[in-house]
């Protein structure tokens, strides 16, 4: 088992462990009880995950809420259902919510925990690769709003993240690749996340493609650990995205617009991110930020992992731009971009000309 301690520089009491290993869900309460003094637990999950892993949590003191599956249910209505259930069960201040599922469940359950009785403990048990490498770590919680993704939410750290790599065995290839898209994102931002360690994630991915796709547990554990350490290094310095943390959104300004204009139905989050990363590499090459050699290497990595690279329709530039400017990552109406500037290094920049930005890319 690997253990990473997430420390938040600004608030020491917010540190928590991420545990990564094969079979951790065989005895989850061994770890959970070390991190919370809760008497009662509410497990939030969905109808896909419940039959697969619901039994792993069964305890006298635990009740479930089983939600419908899908990003379209990441709404205030579903959030209210979680809060109603917590009230019905009379959860108290010391009690605890457990998120058992992917990023949708994790984001919603975490947000419910952040506002129920002004904040109770919660634990992340991520079951998708995307959630294990990214969404379960760092305390971003939210639901969507018709005006945009994750518009209503809070920064609220969990007490524990428990990642059992065995859960990835039941993930279908599309969802597995969605997680790989966020993994590859870390390869492109590695140097900017942490100057202290050199993980060589890009080389690791280039050299271990087959083992990754055969879901070799040691390789997956190593990958998840690297991503979590990189994310922790960023969150430690900037929990509430005042600056540096924005780099974790590499490719996401385009991705969120893609998800929005396709009504969260056509592409998974990771697919939108891989298309978004390709777009930002195109832009960086076009505007002279990176050389052709790095561009080719980056795009080969995305393609070799079989990730979606291009939109299969031509969006309206005006509509696309409007959606991008209503995204949370907008700073005084000027779009902030995380631009690749050299190998594994990115920079936050804003103030781009709309025409230069989108023409030739969309
Ligand atoms: P998801 O939660 O919708 O899960 C994808 C699908 O896989 C769902 O159908 C789910 O039921 C199913 N599933 C989950 N675990 C499974 C398993 N082990 N076996 C079989 N099926 C399984 O999607 P996701 O990709 O995990 O997360 C996407 C969400 O995460 C988005 O809402 C995005 O905004 C959010 N996100 C949040 C952060 C953050 O920092 N909080 C970061 C990245 C993404
Ligand atoms: N996934 C982006 C963040 O956690 O900040």
Image (cartoon, rainbow, N blue to C red):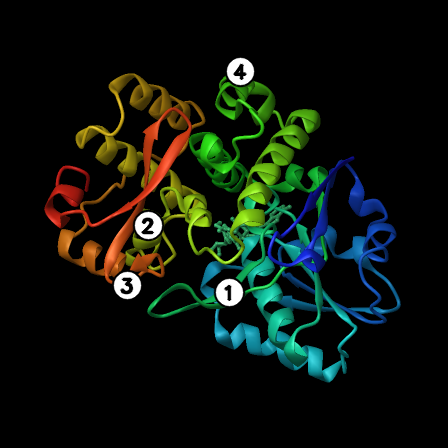
Which residue carries the number 2 mark?
A: 253
Q: Position of residue 189 (x, y in %)?
A: 44, 34
In this rendering, which labeled residue sits more in front, label 3 or label 4?
A: 3
Q: Would you say the residues marked 3 and 4 are in contact, meaning their CB atoms lie under 8 Å apart?
A: no
Mark 4, secondary structure of its residue: helix
| Mark 3 within 8 Å of ligand 1, using the beta carbon | no
User: Does 181 appear above or below 117?
Assistant: above
**Closer to us: 94 or 236:** 236
Q: Earlier in the sequence, mark 3 or mark 4?
A: 4
- Is residue 214 found left or right of 37 in the rendered image? left
The reply to whether residue 129 is in sight is no
User: Does 185 appear above or below 8?
Assistant: above
**Closer to us: 338 or 79:** 338
**Closer to us: 273 or 176:** 273
Distance CA(mark 3)–CA(mark 1): 17 Å
Q: Report the disc number at residue 326.
A: 3
Mark 2, secondary structure of its residue: helix
Distance CA(mark 3)–CA(mark 4): 39 Å
**Residue at the spot 48% in from the left edge and 35% down from the top edge:** 186
Q: Position of residue 343 (x, y in %)?
A: 38, 24
Circle 2 Cα neighbour tier, 10 Å, few/some/many (<14 / 14–19 / ≥20): many
Circle 3 Cα neighbour tier, 10 Å, few/some/many (<14 / 14–19 / ≥20): some
Distance CA(mark 4)–CA(mark 1): 36 Å
| Mark 1 within 8 Å of ligand 1, using the beta carbon | yes
Which residue carries the number 4 mark?
A: 207
Q: Earlier in the sequence, mark 2 or mark 4?
A: 4
Mark 3, secondary structure of its residue: loop
Q: Would you say the residues marked 3 and 1 are in contact, meaning their CB atoms lie under 8 Å apart?
A: no
Quadrant of the image occupied by residue 345: top left
**Residue at the spot 54% in from the left edge and 73% down from the top edge:** 78
- Is residue 302 found left or right of 357 in the rendered image? right
């Amino acid at each position: 088992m690997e253990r990473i301690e997430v420390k938040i520089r600004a608030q020491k009491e917010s540190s928590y462990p991420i545990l990564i290993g094969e079979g951790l869900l065989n005895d989850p309460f061994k770890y959970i009880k070390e991190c919370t003094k809760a008497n009662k637990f509410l497990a939030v999950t969905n109808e896909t995950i419940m039959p697969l892993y619901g039994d792993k949590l069964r305890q006298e003191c635990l009740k479930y809420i089983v939600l419908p599956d899908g990003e379209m249910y990441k709404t205030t209505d579903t959030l209210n259902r979680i809060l109603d259930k917590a009230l019905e069960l009379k959860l108290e201040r010391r009690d605890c919510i457990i998120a058992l599922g992917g990023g949708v469940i994790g984001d919603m359950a975490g947000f419910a925990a952040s506002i129920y009785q002004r904040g109770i403990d919660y634990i992340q048990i991520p079951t998708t690769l995307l959630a294990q490498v990214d969404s379960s770590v760092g305390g971003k919680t939210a639901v969507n709003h018709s005006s945009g993704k994750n518009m209503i939410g809070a920064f609220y750290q969990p007490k524990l993240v428990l990642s059992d790599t065995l859960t990835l065995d039941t993930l279908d290839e599309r969802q597995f690749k969605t997680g790989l898209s966020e993994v590859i994102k870390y390869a492109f931002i590695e140097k900017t996340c942490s100057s202290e360690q050199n993980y060589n994630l890009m080389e690791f991915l280039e050299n271990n493609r087959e083992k990754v796709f055969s879901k070799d547990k040691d390789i997956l554990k190593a990958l998840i650990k690297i991503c979590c350490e990189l994310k922790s290094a960023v969150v430690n310095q900037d929990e509430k995205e005042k600056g540096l943390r924005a780099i974790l959104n590499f490719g996401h300004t385009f991705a969120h617009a893609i998800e929005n204009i396709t009504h969260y139905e056509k592409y998974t989050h990771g697919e939108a991110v891989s298309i978004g990363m390709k777009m930002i590499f195109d832009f960086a090459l076009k505007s002279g930020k990176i050389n052709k050699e790095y561009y080719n290497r980056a795009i080969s990595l995305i393609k070799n992992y079989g990730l979606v690279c291009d939109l299969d329709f031509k969006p309206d530039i005006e509509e696309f731009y409007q959606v991008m400017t209503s995204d949370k990552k907008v700073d005084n109406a000027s779009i902030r971009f995380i631009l690749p500037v050299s190998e594994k290094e990115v920079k936050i920049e804003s103030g781009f000309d709309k025409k230069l930005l989108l023409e030739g890319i969309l």
